[in-house]
Amino acid sequence: MNRLKKLDQRIYPIATLFLAVILWQLIVTLAHIPLYILPSPLDTVNALVSDFSAIAGHVGTTLYESVLGFALSIALAFVLGILMDSFQVVKKSIYPILIVSQTIPTIALTPLLIVWFGFGILPKILIIVMVCFFPICISLVDGFEKVDKDYLNLFHSYKASKLQTFIHLKLPYALVNLFSGLKIAATYMIMAAIIGEWQGGTKGIGVYMVRTKNAYALDKVFAAILVIVIVSVAFIYVINYVAKKTTHWK
């Protein structure tokens, strides 16, 4: 029964996407829309196949930046999340600043980071951390706060130390929230790297998109977008898989 339910949940979005692609192909073909205005799905796939080696090289750079920035975001979120959970003065001082920081447009900060740190990989990683850190940290802190008080009292009655309470109760309890934050951050991760590459860089899928756009090779731009979607979905799938393995008790 569960398998049928899962299959039913997957069929509808797949069928809708399939119909949308067919409709897209028919509109471009029947309306004779030029390639430099709107490429068809077949044009996009052909561009991906013909320019695969160049796209793969640029994607490798973007993936390296994204994974490194994502890992740093997780590490920073854990450190600050634990501090905010352990010391209320830290939470009262930093939490409002974190929320206000998200009102600053990322695209406005990117040129400043490039001026300060150059056109290398560092500005891209900093942008990814700025974008991904917030949802991970807030989800983790929220998970710590949602720990059942009865469980905390039980651990206290057994005279468990703060470290034991954290490892055996708070952290497992907060994992569900943490993975929700990770999935949100993963959807922004590649996008943040591309924004950094758009503003200034020598390699990366964002650089590739700018070059092909300026050459009016929109089929290659759409091919790059297709790769970005596939990579992003793959990251979310990996996070979902790890979440199911580590939070099976929920």
Image (tube, helix red, strand yellow):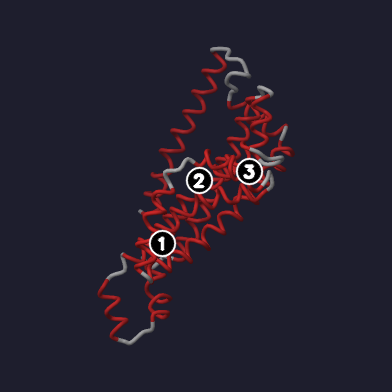
Which of the 4 image quarters holds residue 152? bottom left
Is label 3 in contact with label 2 (beta carbons under 8 Å)? no
Please tell me which residue is depicted at 43% across the width and 38% down the height of the picture: 13
The residue at the point 41 percent across, 70 percent down is: 171
Amino acid bearing label 3: Ile
Look at mark 1 in the image and give the residue it sits on.
140
The first of marks 1 and 2 along the sequence is 1
Q: Is residue 137 left or right of residue 59?
A: left
Label 3: how many residues lie within 10 Å, few (<14), some (14-19) or many (20+)? some
**Labels 1 and 2 touching (C-beta < 8 A):** no
In front: label 3 or label 2: 3
Q: CA distance from mark 3 to mark 2?
A: 20 Å
Can you give x and y, in whole percent of width and height, for residue 136 in the image?
45, 56
Q: Nearer the viewer, residue 238 or 144?
A: 144
Nearest to N terminus: mark 3 or mark 2: 3
Q: Amino acid at mark 2?
A: Tyr
* Spatial separation of the CA atoms under disc 1 and disc 3: 30 Å
Residue 101, position as x, y percentages in the image: 44, 49
Res 114 label: 3
1 and 3 marks in contact (CB < 8 Å)? no
The residue where tag 2 is placed is 188
Q: Quadrant of the C terminus?
A: bottom left
Task: Assign a secondary structure to mark 1.
Answer: helix
Amino acid carrying label 1: it is Leu
- Which percent across, then down, holds residue 116? 63, 47
Q: Residue furthest top?
A: 31
